[in-house]
Each structure stands twice: as structure tokens, then as C-alpha cells.
Image: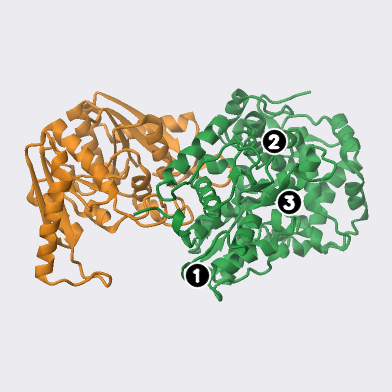
Chain colours: A green, B orange
Amino acid sequence: MPEGTLCNKKPIDSAEALNTLLSDTSGEVYYREMKSIEVDTKLLWKTIQNTCKSRIRTWLEICAHCGMCADSCFLYLVDDHNPKQVPAYKIQSTLGEIIRKKGNVDNNFMIKTMEIAWSQCTCCNRCAMYCPHGIDVGIMMGYLRGLLYQQGFVPWELKIGAGMHRVYRAQMDVTNEDFVDTFEWIVEEYEDEYPGLKAPVDIQGADIMYTVNAREVKHYPEDLAEAAILFHIAGENWTVPSKGWEQTSLSMFAGDWAACKMQVETVYDAMERLKPKIMVGTECGHAHRATVVEGPYWVGRKDGRPPVKSIHYVEWLADALKTGKLKIDPAKRLKVPVTLQDSCNYVRNHGLKSATREIIKHIVEPGYFIEMSPNKEHNYCCGGGGGFNGVGLYRPQRNKALITKRDQILSTGAKLVLAPCHNCWDAIRDLEEEYTIGIEWSFLKPVIIKMLDIPEHLRPRE
Amino acid sequence: MFKKILFATSATKASDHAARVAFNISNLYNSHMNILHILGVPSRGFSQKVTDVKTREKVEVDDEYIAWVKEEIKTYYAELLPKTKSYEIKTLIGYPHREILREIRKNKPDLLVMGRSTESEGSPVYKFGSAGSTLQRVIKASDCPVLLVNRPAASFWGSITNIVFATDFSKSSDVAFDFACKLARNINCELHIFHAQNISLTPESEIFDQDTIEQRMREKLRFFRKKYVSKMEGIDNYSIEVWEGVPYIEIVKYAREKFADLIIMAQDSKNPGSTTEELGSNIKQVILRAGCPVLCMTK
């Protein structure tokens, strides 16, 4: 069975293998090798027989090819209504075809399928809302990615990303020691300003266990400090786990099912170990989907829920503002035109649209908030979801995809886009770099810290 | 005193004056020099691409690229490098302020030397969603003194013979004062302690008559002697003065009059850790205008 040295069916399982793959600039050798790796058709068909259950089989079967999904897909719209971008076509011509052929597909087919799976679908699941049968192409694409990953047909960055989770249990090379050290360091940096600010690690039985995105640790630890500040001011009894702190899952984007399970298990283990009342995750969309929505099924939890109640950061924040744990100085509310990016992963797919709007009510001066159109569960993907942001091979397609969000933002006239999701934040940042429309973008934490009415006893002494 | 210098550079014109001073210090005090260049800002999700800070191109950083960048830095500083006996060049990827702070924490240099902001800092490449330059962010959180060299005039540096310590009586000014004394004792130079009474007519400021101003200045001078002189054992040559005016202008003027080689100040923002608030306007203006390097202390 011909396999490449870098591009093959074997998952990355050591730091050494990771470095070797990383040193292949832009995945040049990797993609060259991909052209000649062989499809293990027997394994492919066996996997389908074992894992492709009635839901997906039914969906593939009952699709009436009515085309109602076409206009729901932002990639179809942004690609000049290209019929090849109709969601039903995209899944029927890939997964549908593999199943019809009982796995007998060749290298060429798999490479084309890879392109469709990662550059023509962000797994935003918007089409499912418009399908008369409720068929969810996003879910099926996620499944298809798993088949492609197993056969070695996965974009270079995602093979690396999944490898990171396997080696470090984090999406980047951040070790548990790095995490604790960075967390303590950054809290130290802010403790003069917020007397009593602490970096509580591994506290048993805290009310809240907070989990993060490794990018915060690696590139902008300010985010960790901001989380600490807000919990501190709100008077929460909280902690972070020294192990199991990473909530994200690039392995989910990659279709590396085994790594998905490994990653989310570390978070659940932390829950079992520390026994917090609830878990709060950072301002990240796919992390929520991975750990709170899908994760329980990956590890086979019968109740379909994580070991402890798990909520998204916006839920905690909305509650803290509503109950007065955090108070906003009304004079400091945002007085610029503001819009909000609804993240697919926790708004459309987990129903949290009212949490973000509750927050907006507190922090934006009435009259300054403009909804995007469409919005809430009907909002379009930021343009970089499902791994699209990070894949160099599909950069031109991704940049084109950003146009949808750009135009949505432009028509609101907003100068500030609140984006409580790492992927959306990145995509909006990138669209500003690509198209320069003169906007600012932000997570919620820094915006809220600037307008807090801090109780007297928590203020720094002069 | 300056055994280890961290010179954070963009290896562009913006760092040229700072480079001259950094290499001079290294030469004078036999310091080991750690030349740090943040070569790129990470971009696009978990992508391996970074935006090169010099060329503004999207590049994939590999060993070859790093070696090339290091070679470029060596060429850029070819004339200055012989001044230092030991140096190393390090390149990192990340948001510049954070990586510089990380490096300070890791290697604990005695001094960080930086130039002015690069012109490209306003571009979305650097933008972290909100405003705030690398310089501001570093000064606010740095554990070690930060030496800033903005004007060409400031970069012609021999040894230090006159230090101006400008105080606003804040807690961080006390830290800066201790450092100024330590430095004055160590290199046996003159120390000039200075305070400028703010009488600038901004909407918030009160208007005093001249008698009140002079009365206050006398009081401050008395307070000065009590607060500082007792702690200045071993420093024979010093002067203490209080002037009235717009503080940053008076500091720059005073430094010029005293032929200062160095101004030491504490960063005077009320909000020292914040990454979004502006640096105190006084220190910012002094950095921009001073004819000598300005050393900022926060902690």
C-alpha cells in the first residue's frame, strides 16, 4: 500500500513527527505525496458499514434534490450561484458517491472530495434550517471528513492541528506547565490594578471551572487575565485545571475522531477530578461545540451531556450582568455603531442567541446596536469556520468567502463588531486586513472590563 | 549594572537611534547583548503563516527563513556589532509586546532598549482589535527598566555623567528613584531631582495666582528634601529643583540645561496594567521630545 513519508494514513503521535511535518514548508512535499497515496477501499467500506448509521443514510436517501438548500449556503451565494456549490450536490457527489460505489473510489476522487469537504463547506449547518426534510449537510460533511482523514486526505495544517491534540492535548504546542506558568504570569501583571486578583489552579469543588483556547495562552494571554478579572470582580469562586484546560478541538475540524475523544476526555477528567459546580468555556464557538455539544457522544456518555453542567462564556456573562454580579457604568456604555457576530456553533447549533443580546442590552447605549441581516440562528458563517481559516491551500477560496461577512457588516454601518468566538474574531480580523473597511473587532471581555463599575473594596488604593 | 541588555528591534530605521545607544552601553559596560526581533505576527487561525513585519508579506516560517532573517539583521547592524563582545540574535513569532514581555520574564535582562514605533503599527496586521502600541504595552508591564531612544540627538551617547530624575511622587516614582540612586552611585555621576508643578491650562486644571504657585513650589521643595535626600547616601553631587509649567516641556528643558545623558521617570498612568489606556501623556511627550534617552520604570 503506497504511503508517503509525510502524507499517510498514520496519525501524528509524537513531537518529533509533528516537527518533521511542520518543517515541510506549506506542506509542499505533503501535498505532492498525497497525489500518489492509495485509497484503502476495503477499510473505507468497512468503516462506512460500521459508522454510517441510519440518520445519514436516510438523509442521503430522502434528499429530493429540490435545491431549497442552495440559497441558504453563503458559499453558493458568494460563488455566483455556482451549481456545484449547492449543499445537496456537494454531499451527494462526495459521500453519496462513495457509498454508492461501496468505497471503490480512487486517489483523484479523494483529492477532489477533500477540496469540497474543507473549502466548500464550513459545517455551519445553516442549510439544515432551510431543508424541508431537515437534512444537515454540515453534519454529513463532518462525517465525510472523518473518512477522508482515515485515508490520509486531509489538509496539511489540520493534520498538524490534530497531531497537536494527540501530542499536547492542545491545539498548539502549549504544555500543561506552559499553561499554568503563563496564567500565573499574566495574572501577576494585572494584580496591582486589581488588588486581590488571583490565579486559582486546581481548586477542588469550586463553583466554576474555566477552560480556554490554547491560542490565548500562546499569543494573547491578556484574554486569560481578562477572564480572571471578570470572575474576580463578580466575586466568583473559580478555578482552572492544570490538565484538561484546553477546550478546543482542531481534531474535530480534521475529522480525527480518535483525537477528538482523547482531547475531550482530558477536559471531562478535569471535571471529575475537581468536581466544580459548572464549567465555563472561553469565547470560542467550536470549543463549545466540541466539549459541550458533541463531546459527550464522542466519549459515549449515555445522557449526552458533559460530567458537569457546561456553559458558554456568553451565558455566564449574561447572567452576571443580569443578576448584578457585574455592574456596568452606564456612562461608559458603547456609543459607536456596534454589531454582533452570531457564532454558528453556539447560536445556531446551541440556541444561545438571547444570551448575547442580553449582554448587548447592558453594554451598548440604546440606539447604537444594529443587527446584521440575517441574524441570530439565521446568521451566515463568519467565512472562516470549520477549519477554513487555517488552511493555506484554500486561502483564495476563504478570502472570497469573507465577502459575505464583509457586506453584512458594511450594510449595518457598524464601526465595531463584537465577535465572541475565536474563529469569527480571526475571520473578521482577516477580512479587515484583506478588504480594509475600517472596522474594529473585539471579544466581549476587554470591552466589558473598560466599562465596569468596580465595587469600592476591589479598586486599587491610591 | 547592565550585564544583560535586551535590545528589541524591528531592524528598521525606527530602531536606528536605539541601536546606537544599545551598542554603546554594551561597549561601555561590557554587557551581553540579546538582540530580539519579532519577525512576524501570527495570522489566520491556526495557520502556519505569519505576516513578516519588515516585508509585510505572508510567509511560512521555517528554519531557512529564520536563518535568512538573522543574516539580514547581522548585515543591518554590521557596523555596530563589533562594539559588543558577546551577543546573540533571537527571532520570535507573536504579538511584539507580548513576546518582548515573555522574553523579559524568561531571561531577566537588566535593561530593555527600544526605539520608536514602526510606521506600520497602525495596520491591521498588528491590530489586536483595539489601539495601543507595542511601546505602551511593554512599558506598562515590563519588570525591567526600559530605555527609549526616539530622537537622533538622543543617540550620541558617551558615558553617563548627568542623570535627571523627574518625579510625580507616585509609588512607581519611588521605584524609579531607587534605580536612579543605584545608578548614580554605581557610575559616580551627578543626580538632578526634578519636579514640574503642573500649571497647564487644560479644562480640568485650576488656575492659581503666582503667589500660590510659588508657595506650593516651596512646600514641594521641602517635601523633596525630606523624602529623597535622606536616602541619597553616597551621592555627593546632586541638585533638587521644582519648576512650574507644562510638566513634559519643563522636564525636557531642565534635562537640556543640565546636559543630561539620561532622564529617569516612572510611567505615570493611573492604570499601569491596562493595554488599552494611553500611556501617561507626560512620559509619552518626554520620550518624543527629549534630547537624551529616557529610562522608564514601572515596577
Residue B103 location, quadrant: top left
Residue A81: image x %, image y %?
A: 73, 62
Q: Is residue A171 left or right of residue A109?
A: left
State the residue in front, A86 or B26.
Answer: B26
Q: Residue furthest bottom?
A: A367
Say which label, 3 or 2, has the lower sequence index. Answer: 3
Crowd tier of the residue under label 1, counting other residues whose Cα lies within 10 Å: few below 14, some 14–19, many 20 or above: some
Which type of secondary structure does the marked residue at label 3 adopt?
A: loop
Tag 2: residue type?
A: Gln
Subunit of label 2: A
Does B129 sit above or below residue B17? below
Tag 3: residue type?
A: Cys
Which type of secondary structure does the marked residue at label 2 adopt?
A: helix
User: Disc 3, disc 2: CB below 8 Å?
Assistant: no
State the residue in front, A362 or A97.
Answer: A362
Crowd tier of the residue under label 2, counting other residues whose Cα lies within 10 Å: few below 14, some 14–19, many 20 or above: many
Mark 3 to mark 2: distance in Å? 20 Å
Mark 3 to mark 1: distance in Å? 39 Å
Residue at image mark 2? A263
Say which label, 3 or 1, has the lower sequence index. Answer: 3
Same subunit: marks 3 and 2? yes
Report if residue A221 is visible in the image: yes
User: How many labels, in total?
Assistant: 3
Residue at image mark 1? A330
Q: Is residue B262 left or right of residue B33?
A: left
Say which label, 1 or 2, has the lower sequence index. Answer: 2
Which type of secondary structure does the marked residue at label 1 adopt?
A: helix
Residue at image mark 3? A123
Report if residue B94 is visible in the image: no
- The structure residue drawn at horizontal position 31% and vertical position 38%, both measured from the top left corner, is B144
